[in-house]
Image (cartoon, coloured by chain):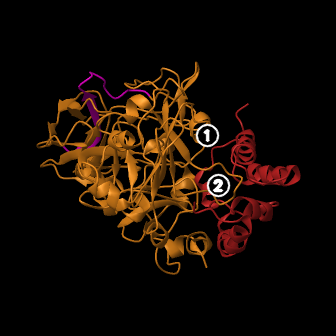
């Protein structure tokens, strides 16, 4: 039988490596999520992964529990998994993987092996946040349709591989090139469903930080994070980070794909961007691109009882590549703020850890929040900038805890 | 690359359908929902998106699946699916 039976037929049982067991519930999920999401979610380990919060098994959509964001580097085993389409080639098929590079706006067409990518190009490393565009969609008010992510559809890793622009130089970029079109080995269950295709504007595709990663935190990419190679687009949401990338094509035209022209859109001008996308922007909606400045408190978790001696507030902050200037912490739900300490700077596209020691506290109820500001002077918003797909939610958390 | 035939998909999806049937609330149209929706994705997508969509919003989702995402669902079946979702997993719009 083919891989379909493995992944589609048996669903979660096959992915999880055994027959169905009694479902284990996540330790914590935000009460802001839809009731049905919290009922359906279970804690489950995919092959090679620690237990993640399963929102769906086919296609697999698993997010990291919030504890994963106590540190600035997300282990591969805790890195979230997100697919649009259910046809995912198994590792055995990916052994035959190759990458076609060329297109109508290229001087020539080439096919690269994994060895070519690792040995025939200068290897670059970039620490960068990979965050699903829809991260925190489930917290949108009012709720909007889609995968109802909490806080965990993101991670930060050190990615290694050749620059995209060095690989494009091998095929020769013609003057008329306006976009780079990307395809990966995963695909739809039905031939009538549009394949997941994405594109990048030349400006971003040729940026120094954009690479074709074959390594993640010093190890080969995990299967479900894009083995053997994925595009890494630091600063931009993960929708452009094509997994199992099999095709990179220079084009003279905008990509007319459902996933570019209909999905992954935000109201024009609602959020700041550094790299315009002129071939895909229109007057009312733009493609989602740059991430907004944001932070997450991983500890404490809402509902916790904490000692009067005090506790540590810790988490991570990130933005689209300007870097984090400061993180503030509030214990009164945002009325007053105090400076948190920042951890080591791992690079302008990476998570920046922060921590704050409360010191002794009177017994009572507290509401913990964090608020990051980037080097462009942008701060997390007080009120949700509602948009129909539930993107870019950077409203500070309100974490109710008790000190006793 | 890595594309498979529709026939293979339907054949091999059968165990998943049987497994998933129990997950959704009973009601008229559940069979149509199971047969049509679970070919491409888990029925947990329905539970996950509940309960907050209005009947009109569910209808829009079914239309999106048919028109934008290529689900081969005819008009009658689509109506049955929308009725099931509206009766079972929808909120009524505020008047």
- Report which quarter residue B56 is drawn in: top right
Name the spot of residue A316 as percent of width and height, x first. Answer: 25, 43
Magenta run includes residue A269? no
Chain identifier of the residue bearing label 2 in the image: B
Provide the secondary structure element on which disc 2 rests: helix
Q: Which mark is residue A257?
A: 1
Mark 2 neighbour class, 10 Å CA radius: few under 14, some 14 to 19, many 20 or more: many
| Residue at the limit of the structure toward the right, as seen here | B76
Q: Position of residue B24 (x, y in %)?
A: 68, 63
* Alpha carbon separation for disc pair 1 and 2: 25 Å
Q: Residue A106, position in %: x, y?
A: 47, 38
Q: Are marks 1 and 2 in contact (CB under 8 Å)?
A: no
Quadrant of the image occupied by residue A328: top left
Q: Which residues are magenta?
A: A362-383
Which chain is depicted orange? Answer: A
A81 w.r.t. A383: above or below = below
Query: Is A346 in front, or is A31?
Result: A346
Q: Closer to the camera: disc 1 or disc 2?
A: 1
User: Can see residue A268?
Assistant: yes
Chain letter of the residue beneath label 1 in the structure image: A
Query: Where is residue A387 drawn, in percent x and y?
Result: 54, 30
Farthest residue in the front direction? A107
Asked if residue A387 is positioned above or below residue A84 in the image, the reply reads: above
Residue, disc 2: B46
Task: Locate the N terminus of chain A and report the quarter of the image it occupies.
Answer: bottom right
Q: Is residue A70 left or right of residue A57?
A: left
């Amino acid at each position: 039988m083919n891989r379909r039976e493995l992944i589609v037929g048996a669903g979660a049982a096959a992915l999880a490596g055994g027959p169905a067991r009694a479902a284990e519930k996540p330790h914590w999920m935000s009460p802001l999520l839809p009731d049905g999401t919290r009922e359906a979610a279970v804690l489950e380990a995919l092959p090679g992964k620690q237990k993640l919060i399963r929102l769906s098994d086919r296609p697999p959509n698993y997010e990291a529990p919030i504890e994963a964001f106590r540190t600035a580097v997300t282990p591969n085993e805790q890195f979230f998994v997100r697919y649009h389409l259910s046809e995912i080639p198994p590792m055995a098929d990916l052994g035959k993987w190759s990458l076609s590079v060329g297109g109508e706006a290229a001087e020539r067409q080439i096919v690269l092996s994994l060895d070519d990518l690792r040995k025939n190009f200068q290897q670059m490393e970039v620490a960068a946040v990979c965050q699903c565009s829809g991260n925190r969609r489930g917290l949108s008010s009012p709720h909007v349709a889609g995968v109802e992510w909490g806080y965990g559809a993101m991670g930060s890793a050190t990615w290694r591989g050749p620059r995209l622009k060095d690989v494009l130089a091998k095929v020769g970029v013609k003057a008329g090139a306006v976009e780079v079109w990307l395809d990966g080995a995963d695909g739809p269950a039905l031939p009538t469903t549009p394949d997941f295709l994405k594109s990048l504007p030349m400006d971003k595709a040729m940026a120094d930080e954009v690479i074709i990663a074959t390594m993640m935190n010093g190890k080969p990419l995990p299967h479900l994070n894009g083995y053997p190679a994925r595009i890494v687009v630091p600063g931009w949401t993960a929708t452009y980070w094509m997994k199992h990338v099999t095709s990179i094509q220079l084009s003279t035209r905008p990509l007319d794909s459902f996933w570019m022209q209909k999905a992954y859109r935000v109201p024009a001008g609602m959020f700041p961007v550094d790299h315009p996308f002129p071939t895909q922007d229109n007057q009312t909606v733009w493609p989602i691109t740059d991430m907004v400045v944001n932070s997450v408190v991983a500890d404490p978790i809402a509902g916790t009882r904490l000692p009067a001696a005090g506790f540590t507030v810790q988490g991570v902050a990130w933005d689209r590549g300007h870097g984090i200037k400061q993180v503030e912490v509030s214990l009164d739900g945002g009325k007053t703020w105090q400076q948190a300490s920042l951890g080591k700077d791992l690079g302008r596209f990476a998570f920046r850890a922060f921590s704050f020691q409360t010191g002794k506290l009177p017994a009572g109820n507290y509401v913990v929040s964090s608020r990051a500001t980037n080097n462009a002077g942008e701060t997390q918003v007080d009120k949700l900038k509602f948009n129909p797909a539930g993107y870019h939610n950077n409203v500070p958390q309100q974490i109710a805890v008790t000190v006793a | 690359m890595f594309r498979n035939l529709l026939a293979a998909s339907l054949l091999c999806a059968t165990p998943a359908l049987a497994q998933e049937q129990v997950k959704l609330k009973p009601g008229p149209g559940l069979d149509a929902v199971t047969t049509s929706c679970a070919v491409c994705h888990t029925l947990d997508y329905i539970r996950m998106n509940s309960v907050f969509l209005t009947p009109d919003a569910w209808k829009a989702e079914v239309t999106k699946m048919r028109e934008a995402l290529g689900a081969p669902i005819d008009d009658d079946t689509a109506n049955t699916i929308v009725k099931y979702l509206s009766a079972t997993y929808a909120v009524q719009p505020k008047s």
